[in-house]
Amino acid sequence: MQKPSLDSKTLIPMEGIERRIYLIRGHKVMLDRDLAELYGVKAIALRQQVKRNKERFPADFMFRLSKKETALLLSQNVIPSRRSLGGFSPYVFTQEGVAMISGVLKSPRAVQVNIAIMRAFVKLREMISTHKELAVKLGELERKIEGHDEHIRSLFDAIHRLMEPPEEPETPKRPIGFLAQKK
């Protein structure tokens, strides 16, 4: 089955871009082969353009995966086979690197694809931010509940003590009231 081609007029689905963004070495990145597919060029052509413009791609814009990182992607089925990579470790591009690619490729499609990818990165960043806020709030709630558990336990202990029958004194009680003395 052949994949549908995307022309510059077609809106690229956000989900299709988002699932191609990976977290590697603490950076959100996209693989060169995925970018080539989105831009409508061959992966080798994309890599050649990048190599011709190396000064535009410092290490924080683009880096090559190690053999171990590539093997990890293969084992997680992110990449179907090493053959799909052209037989070597792929380059990955950060958001800044992706922005630089559109300037290197210089086509109307590159501009449209770049806009869609930037929107996907922004949406992903917003989602991560929301999850962090929820995690903080959940942590605060857990700390509050832990304190309540202790208070609730002490209340139950006090109620149980009140429910116990009173202890019988060892000495008999003196009768209550006024006693008239007999003569």
Image: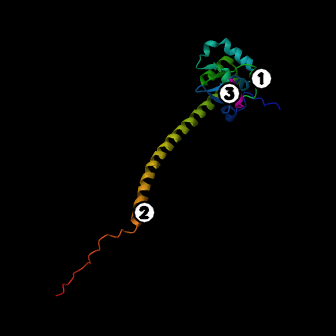
Find out whether residue 77 is within the magenta segment.
Answer: yes
SS of the residue at dot 1? helix
Q: Is residue 23 visible?
A: yes
Q: Amino acid at mark 1?
A: Arg
Q: Nearer the viewer, residue 39 or 94?
A: 94
Quarter that holds the N terminus: top right
The disc placed on residue 83 is 1
Q: Residue furthest left?
A: 183
The disc placed on residue 72 is 3
Residue 174: x and y in percent read: 26, 76
Q: Which of the marked residues, 1 or 2, is nearer the chain's N terminus?
A: 1
Residue underneath mark 2? 160
Closer to the observer: label 1 or label 2?
2
Where, by quadrant of the figure, is residue 60 drawn? top right
Taking the spot 52% from the left edge, 40% from the top edge, the residue there is: 135
Question: In 3D space, how far apart are the residues under numbered discs 1 and 2 (Cα atoms)?
Answer: 71 Å
Where, by quadrant of the figure, is residue 43 drawn? top right
Q: Which range of residues does the magenta coloring cover?
A: 70-78
Find out whether residue 73 is within the magenta segment.
Answer: yes
User: Is 82 placed left or right of 66 in the picture?
Assistant: right
Q: Amino acid at mark 3?
A: Leu
